[in-house]
Image (cartoon, rainbow, N blue to C red):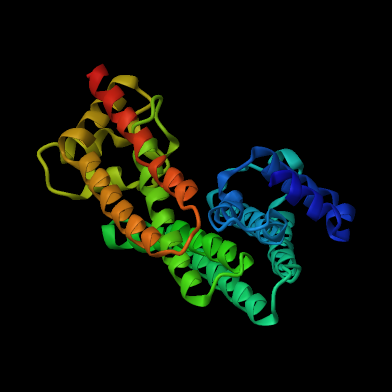
Amino acid sequence: MYSHVSRFLQKNKIFSDWRDFRRLIDTIINEKPKHIWIPALIGECYECNKELLVPASTCLTLAYTSIILIDDLLDGDGRFSKHACNPPQLANMSAAMVAAAYQSLLSIPLSDKEKICALSILGRMLINVAHGQHLDTGDVTDESTYWEIVRLKSGAFFAGALGLGGVACGVDAEEVGLLIKLGEEYGILIQIHDDLRDSLEVPANTDWGNGRHPLPILFAETVEHPWRDRFNSIRTQVEDSQLLHEAQEILLRCGAISYGLYQIENHYDSAMQLLHQLKMKNNAPLVKVLDELVHPVDQLIKGLSEEG
């Protein structure tokens, strides 16, 4: 699908004439993120012609790139500095990518009603993600804010991704609605999975020192437990491998990791219930990607426990 998206974009005059724009899109495509493959995955489940999914996958590629450009600007990561683009240029290109994403959807060979549905899904996704990014620039000190951000960012993005795949396959409105709900659950699962993985990484993930609050770290900082003061005192000193090991052991002892696994189990169950309501010809590809979110975290925890 990545090569299909690249060829689709090359037909666009903006893509061929605007070199910086093209380089940024090529960077994302060459990384082969699973995110932009979602419409094709949905097409596989409904046994839909892959060619029908190319405009939706292209739309998602452009929207995804726009989102991470803004995220880069908000976080100051400098991920795209190698392209010699300054912040105003990146912001400008992000706006262009959103416009190009909408144009891509107009190429889907479906009825006007279905195209309007696709445009509505994209608009809702982009607005929610922007709202979530706005909240994420603040200080996340409570769990309710954490869940709102997760729902608005990762949840909304994947809700849109699955919804766009469904529209491109021509499924009915009820089915699209179920896909959107499933996408939200999938996005929340991805965020919890990433938070658990990042919190247990060795050497320390940057989340420990940059003030961000993945779910396990937020839990250990805010929930009453015997090691909370110690955890808060060493949280930003985890460049020291011994202190990182101690902090990660506290995550295990205080229940932060168990709580994350509990949330994964709950959202996985919700996702599977939605999946079984869908009228897919073959849901095995979606079952596989859902299962892939559960097993790696178990392995990380097992490895950390064996080291202890």
**Residue at image x 42%, y 40%?**
292
Which quadrant would residue 241 be assigned to in this image? top left
Which quadrant would residue 229 be assigned to in this image? top left
- Total marks in image: 0
Q: Between residue 289 and residue 242, name the one nearer to us.
A: 289
Q: Is residue 288 left or right of residue 222?
A: right
Give the percent coordinates (x, y) of residue 86. 72, 50
Q: Looking at the rendering, in which quadrant would you find the C terminus?
A: top left
Q: Is residue 139 left or right of residue 254?
A: right
Q: Is residue 211 above or below residue 274?
A: above
Q: Between residue 60 and residue 72, name the one nearer to us.
A: 60
Which quadrant would residue 17 be assigned to in this image? bottom right
Give the percent coordinates (x, y) of residue 110. 70, 73
Asked whether residue 121 appears in the rendered view, the answer is: yes
**Residue at image x 61%, y 69%?**
170
Give the percent coordinates (x, y) of residue 264. 30, 48
**Residue at image x 16%, y 39%?**
254
Asked whether residue 85 appears in the rendered view, the answer is: no
